[in-house]
Image: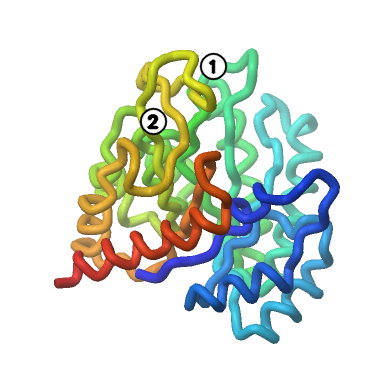
Amino acid sequence: MKIAMMTYTMARGRKKGEAFDVEGLCRFTRELGLEGVDWVTTYEHDPREVRRIMDDHGLRTVCYTFFCDLNFPTAAERRPGLDTFRRGIEAAVALGADKVMLPVSGKSGCTREESFRNVVQGLHEAVILAEEAGVTTTVENFPHPLSPFIVSDDVNRAIREVPQLRVTFDNGNVVTGGESAADGFRKSAPYVVHAHFKDFQSCPEGTPGAHICLDGKYRRAVLVGDGDVDQVACVQAMREHGYQGYINFEYEGSDLSPRDATIEGVRRMREWIAQSSS
């Protein structure tokens, strides 16, 4: 198991209007002894230029994450989303990524089942575009209570309908659906090609930063190891299955700066991974 930098975490520390510092991100990644980066869009930078800078620092793009809305009932309505997906695949190829991830939130006015049906129909077409470019399409467990993909049963069901699809396992998000991280991984393990580690802490309604989850609990984002996720059990389940891929460190909280959270979070993750192999 290898830890990857996730640009989303670092981008949260930018001031309004501030450009994303690709060089700075690469230097910080190297300072931490990491070799992989998951680019969550390229923040208006040309993907080819990002690739050049990454190459200069001896880094590789392990996943390209971007947003496209396929949650519509008709092919005509999904067409703009598929056009966005096509451009995302082009960016992934330019970055040298072999996989992409689509975050799929819920949509007001749609039930989880309606969103599932809409998105799966779009994915049938999307995975073909990706395959033609040599890229694997993944979806993650997403924490929005109306998302069609939250727990392992959701993503596994999607793969039964779109066999080329794969999973970016998110050990914090799966817990918001009432499933333990270890169980969520075990049930989807054959399809997991990438992973995110994050954490949420249960809290009373009205707590700053808290949001309602599918399991009915309110949670706020905290540093890995400080919340509801049994990180050690999750790492052990991944070790037992033989997972050898990358795991993004992810932080959505506000108690620490993105930089400080990443330094401490990566340290903790390294410790858990080392413990699981002893």
Tell me the residue at 20%/66% (across/down): 275
Tell me the residue at 41%/21% (across/down): 218
Q: Position of residue 167 (x, y in %)?
A: 45, 51
Tell me the residue at 29%/33% (across/down): 179
Question: Does the image show residue 138?
Answer: yes
Q: Quadrant of the rendered structure where residue 29 is? A: bottom right
User: Which residue is outermost to the left?
Assistant: 278
Left or right placement of residue 184 versus residue 264 in this view:
left
Q: Position of residue 266 (x, y in %)?
A: 42, 63
- Residue with the mark numbered 2: 176
The amino acid beneath tag 1 is Thr
Q: Quadrant of the N terminus?
A: bottom left
Left or right placement of residue 197 versus residue 44 in this view:
left
Q: Quadrant of the rendered structure where residue 173 is? A: top left
SS type, badge 1: loop
SS type, badge 2: helix
- Residue with the mark numbered 1: 111
